[in-house]
Amino acid sequence: MNQQDLITLFRQDRETAFRQIYQIAFPKVAKVIGRSGGSLEDAKDIFHESLIILYEQCREDQLRIRGSVIAYVTGMCRNRWLNQVKQLRKEVLIDDFSMNEPVEEFQFEEDAPSHGLLNWLEKAGKKCLDMLQAVYYFKYSMQEVAEEFGFRTTRSATVQKYKCLEKVRDEVKNAQHETIPA
C-alpha cells in the first residue's frame, strides 16, 4: 500500500484502512517492542498513538512517505518506543539521585576525544544508525530490515548494512588517527 492508496482508502472507508494497517504492521511492532523489553500493552499504546498521527497527517494532507505505508508506521512506532524508553531511563536516573548526598567536583578535560560507539554510529548517519540498531539491538532478520527500510531484496539490505558498518569503521579509524601523535 502506497501513500496515495492509503489516502484514498481513508477517505472511502477509514475502518478498513485501519484494519489493513493493523493486520500487517502490528505484529512487526509488537515483535520489536517485545524484543526490547516492552509488553503487549506497550506495543498497543505505541501503535495506536502512531495510527492517530498517521490518520491526522492524511486528513491534513501532511503525509510524506517515500517507502511503503507499513514501513512508515513500523518505523514511527519504533522511534516512539525508543523515545519512551529513553525518557523512562532519564526518569529512573533522576529518581535514583539523592539531593542530600555530597557531590564531588569533577573537572572535564576540554579536549578529550569522544570514543563512544554511539558517537561513531551517529557520525555514520541516521539511516545507518537506525539500520544497525534494527539488526543488532532489535535482532531484525535481513528480510525484516529490507521491508522496514524499503529495500526490494534482502541482498540490497545486506549490502547497505555492510556499507553502514564500513562507515562506522572509517569513523573509528579517523578518530584513532586524530588521537595518535605523529
Image (cartoon, rainbow, N blue to C red):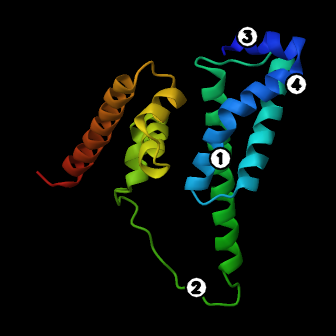
Where residue 15 is drawn, which disc sits there? Answer: 4
Q: Nearer the viewer, mark 2 or mark 4?
A: 4
Identify the mark at residue 30; answer none if there is no mark. Answer: 1
Is 162 or 91 nearer to us in this picture? 162
Residue wearing tag 2: 103
Residue found at the far bottom of this picture:
101
How far from the left and from the top, in percent, is residue 125?
Answer: 44, 35
In the orientation shown, which residue stands out farthest toward the left? 182
* Label 2 CA crowd tier, 10 Å (few <14, some 14–19, many 20+): few
Quarter of the rendering occupied by the N terminus: top right
Label 3 or label 4, whichever lies nearer to me, is 4
Task: Tell me which label, 3 or 2, sits earlier in the chain.
Answer: 3
Q: Quadrant of residue 163?
A: top left
Q: Using residue 28 as the reference point, say whether residue 170 is left or right of it.
A: left
Q: Residue at the spot x=72%, y=9% of the render?
A: 4
Front position among marks 1 and 2? 1
Amino acid bearing label 3: Asp
Q: Check if mark 3's residue and mark 4's residue have beta carbons within 8 Å.
A: no
Q: Earlier in the sequence, mark 2 or mark 4?
A: 4
Q: Is residue 96 visible?
A: yes
Instruction: State which tag comes first along the sequence, 1 or 3.
Output: 3
What residue is rendered at 58% in x and 19% in y?
Answer: 67
**Mark 1: few/some/many CA within 10 Å (<14, 14-19, 20+):** many
Q: Residue at x 65, y 46 (%)?
A: 30
Q: Position of residue 164 (x, y in %)?
A: 35, 35
Number of numbered callouts drawn: 4
Question: Eyeballing the image, is 91 above or below 131?
Answer: below
